Image (cartoon, rainbow, N blue to C red):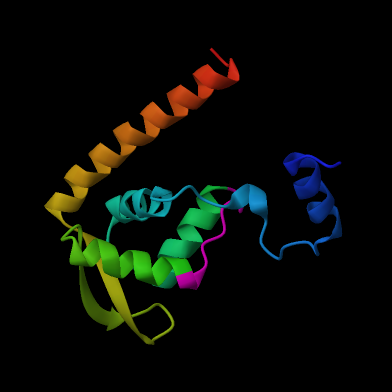
Amino acid sequence: MLSPIDIRVEKAKTMPPKKKNAEAEMLQGTLDMLILKTLVMGPAHGHTIAHVIEHTSEDFLQVEQGSLYPALHRLEDRGWLSSSWGTSENNRKAKFYELTPAGKKQLTVETNRWRQIARAIELVMGER
């Protein structure tokens, strides 16, 4: 008789591979922190924000539009970002996002929380 873990392993062997790189999936809430951090450099539109995150992570993290724009709207609704319409570098109308003072404070909170999570994982993994 197969145990539950054996069943999951057998299922995984027969399932088609996922299109996304599972290693690059972000923990919930991490995208918000990365967006806030990216906007410390100044206002940017969505495509640029995604590109900066991807480039800075040496293309390990991939930011999907289906995740990015809901996150931008959520951060704006919380008062951590403001937005205005402008013209992108290729002369197209684009919405530019900017970090608010409340967003800067939240970035500090999120960064500290991330460091606590990373430290806890290191402890569990025996890295320290």
| 98 relative to 46 in the view: left or right | left
The magenta segment is 58-66
> Where residue 85 appears, x then y in whole percent?
24, 81
The answer to whether residue 60 is magenta is yes
In the rendering, at what x and y percent does residue 103 appear? 20, 52
On the image, which quarter does residue 59 sit in?
bottom right
Q: Residue furthest top?
A: 128
List x then y, in percent, for residue 83. 21, 72
Q: Is residue 63 above or below residue 116?
A: below
Near-viewer residue (50 or 15): 15
In the image, farthest residue toward the bottom: 92
Using the rendered image of the protein, determine whether residue 60 is visible from the camera's viewpoint.
Answer: no
59 shown above or below 95: above
Question: Can residue 75 be seen in the rendering of this structure?
Answer: yes
The secondary structure that most of the magenta stretch takes on is loop
Query: In the image, what residue occupies the spot 79% across and 53% down?
Result: 12
Residue at 36% from the left image edge and 56% from the top image edge: 35
Image quarter of residue 108: top left
Question: Residue sitting at 28 percent across and 58 percent down?
Answer: 42
Q: Is residue 98 left or right of residue 121?
A: left
Against 127, is 118 above or below? below
